[in-house]
Amino acid sequence: MLSLRQSNTPLRAAWVEINLAQLRRNLEIIRADMPPNLKWCSVVKDQAYGHGAVEIARETVRAGASYVAVATLDEALELRGAQIKAPILIFGERPPTALDCCIENDFTIFVNDTAQAKQADEIARKKSKFASVQVEIDTGLSRYGIRWTKAPSVIESILQLANLQLAGIMTHFAMSDELDKTFAYEQLRRFEELLQQLRERKILSSYSLLLHACNTGGYLDISKAHFDMVRMGILPLGVYPSKACRRISGLLPIMSVKTRIAAIKPIELGDTVGYGMRYRAESPRTIAVLPIGYGDGFPRVRNTGYVLVHGKRAPVIGGNAMDAMMIDITDIPQTQLWDEVVIMGKQGKDEISVHDLAAWGGTVSYDIMTRWSVRMPRVYLE
Ligand SMILES: *Cc1c(COP(=O)(O)O)cnc(C)c1O
């Protein structure tokens, strides 16, 4: 199973630092920003976006998260194995073969059709258990869930099943963090339309159902959609989902990526650098080799991006390899072998943000964070 736990070997000269003290500050700041009665679900799927699911969940549960959420059964089992006591929600759909294990371990799963609900009910009955389930409503993402117009009858049929306990109803936004909120408000209107039908059928008044719709973007900018709980993954990590969304003063990223200078060499006019000879020196230069590549999660780039050396920006030259990349340090002559280099994060007065790396790699911040590979040791700072 994927795990970011560390071995006892000497630290590799390329690593990911996670600042747990800043995580705790972020959690305090977010709690102070939240309306007092709003619950929150800490989303720690994909190793809490590469930060380490167990370490992040421990802090978020301590800070008051009502649920933790993951995307796979293995992720849920890892949290349970690490004594995370909060209820665990598994997003998405479970194959029939996984239902038994989910119910055995009291994970909350989504059942989004009647046939699967009956199957889950049957398994729970055999175990003399009540399986906690939620229903996802598809209001426009066209991913998981029941189309909002078709949901009331499915929800009623789930409520008939004696060994299922319907704990909540949720939906998920397709675009919550952009300036244009038109479609998010349309999705909210569809969700409200469903809730109105459930009210008319006396379902909302007869059962205690947790209603939730917001991810981080929704939490920040669509307060009408907060309902009972919000689901936040990226915000506690100190990263905003987009440039457009509301800012909360004091939040800072908790992940930095660092390496060290592994070789320094002068090159001459006309020398090429790296596979594919994508860089050709137009004058004599001093270059350094960093022992980190696209295999470690640095985006696959050519002559694009910077790293920080002695607080200064050194450009990436050539195409990066799986295990190494080259930088131009001609203007940073004090550089020595094994000096620390910042790939993502702060050094001196400068900072390379996850959004910078995302722009250089033509991708999104979520992708950059989750991509740092398991061979990059995680170092947790208290
Ligand atoms: C990943 C995910 C979230 C968390 O999104 P953030 O933007 O990281 O807060 C919330 N809900 C669902 C269904 C998700 O898949």
Image (spheres, rainbow, N blue to C red):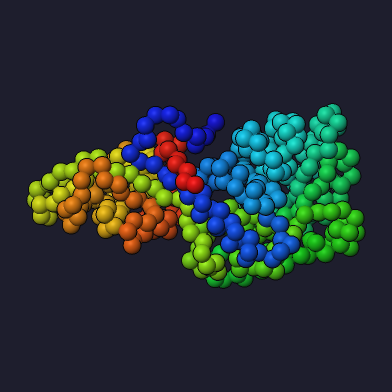
Q: Quadrant of residue 14?
A: top left
> Residue 173 at what x, y percent from top left?
63, 59
- Quarter containing the N terminus: top right
What residue is at 16 percent from the left and 46 percent from the top?
Answer: 272
Q: Is residue 159 visible?
A: yes
Q: Is residue 75 left or right of residue 159?
A: left
Q: Is residue 371 visible?
A: no
What residue is at 33 percent from the left and 39 percent from the top?
Answer: 13
> Residue 308 at what x, y percent from top left?
30, 54
> Residue 115 at what x, y percent from top left?
79, 39
Q: Quadrant of residue 175?
A: bottom right
Which residue is at the far front?
Answer: 382
Q: Is residue 28 left or right of residue 123?
A: left
Q: Is residue 268 left or right of residue 61?
A: left
> Residue 49 at what x, y percent from top left?
52, 47
Q: Is residue 374 positioned above or below 280 on the image? A: above
Residue 245 vs residue 299, the one in the foreground? 245
